[in-house]
Image (tube, rainbow, N blue to C red):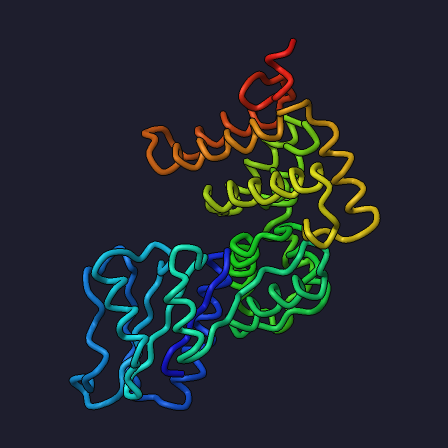
Amino acid sequence: MAVLLLTGDDDLLLLREVERRLEAVLAAEPDLTVDRYDVAELEHLPELRTTSLFGGRTCVVLRGVEAIAGDLKAEVERYLDAPSPDADLVLVARGTGRVQRIAKRAKEQGERVDVKRPADWDDHGWDRVVGEEFRRLRRKADATAIAAIRTHAGTEPAAIASQVGSVCATHADVSVLLAEHVDAVVAGHGRASGFAVADAIAERDPRGALVALRGALDAGEAPLAIVGAITYRVRQLLQVRSGASPKEAGLRPGRGYEDTKARARAFAPGELAWVHDRLAQLDLQLKGSDLPDGTVLELAVLELATSREVGAPFNPLASRS
């Protein structure tokens, strides 16, 4: 492996790819020492050019590389100019915009893998994501169980992982999991996913959005994952409203795309831009507010799902009226 860069926009999918790669390496090299770090925890790059204390090779996993800066960034860049054959360096980044030199050198010296979430319309891709979560827990699930998880969790990897884990723990003695086992655990929450909240907001349905939010929170979905799902959907609406093709917006051509166009048209002038700005505020509130996350989310979701006329700077026509 020597040097591996994993990049993508979903934390869970990135984590799973790291686990998969390390599992394969450790199977071939059981004595490998693996150390995991976050960029925020380090000032300097751990030593990679000397053998570990136990005599074997070392693998360093460095997360949060998209935010790397200062001396640590310079050290990683220098290391990538001449990486050690006696160590592996795994770089994990949510994006490469600010680390272009690192991304370029990592690809030249080793391998770059873009970990992409399936498009909303990619049924096979999402079936694979669900199936891999069951396999990771060494459990068998038939097609009906996979379909049931998708119905409840939608297209949010964190919700899928949470619900698969709950189903497997509840039905520990079942040899092959079926839809009935999934429904027995997660039914009652509706489609417990951030995308259910996002869809209700897109439909301008405040009551439906709050019901979906409570279901998602009860199912264990992380607040920031819910915000991420809403943001993803709002960006799709903005793209479609500006004339993006189905492929550009990550949508299935046909009815799904036409439904999204209709939803986008239902927003008043400038309202989608206001929603996008409110989501940025919500992200900051969740990271710094003294209020419970559930309360912060409920107040914001109610605002986001309620139709409104907006003024400047979101509505370019407002100053003329």
Q: Locate residue 261, reporting x and y percent.
A: 76, 38
Residue visible at 31% across and 88% down? 85
Describe residue 72's horizontal placement relative to residue 147 as left or right: left
Q: Locate residue 252, reporting x and y percent.
A: 76, 53
Task: Name the residue at the top extreme.
Answer: 321
Q: Locate residue 139, reporting x and y percent.
A: 56, 72
Task: Name the residue at the right extreme.
Answer: 254
Question: Against 230, is 185 above or below?
Answer: below
Residue visible at 74% across and 30% down? 265
Task: Name the residue at the left extreme.
Answer: 53
Between 24 and 175, which is closer to the camera in this rendering? 24
Q: Quadrant of residue 247?
A: bottom right
Between 305 and 171, which is closer to the camera in this rendering? 305
Query: What quarter of the picture does the C terminus occupy?
Result: top right
Describe residue 240's horizontal placement relative to residue 72 as left or right: right
Q: Locate residue 221, reporting x and y percent.
A: 50, 47
Between 149 and 237, which is closer to the camera in this rendering? 237
What is the number of callouts on the image? 0
Query: What quarter of the picture does the N terminus occupy?
Result: bottom left
Between 119 and 67, which is closer to the camera in this rendering? 67
Residue visible at 27% across and 62% down? 73
Question: Against 96, is 237 above or below?
Answer: above
Describe residue 117's horizontal placement relative to residue 32 as left or right: right
Q: Quadrant of residue 200?
A: top right
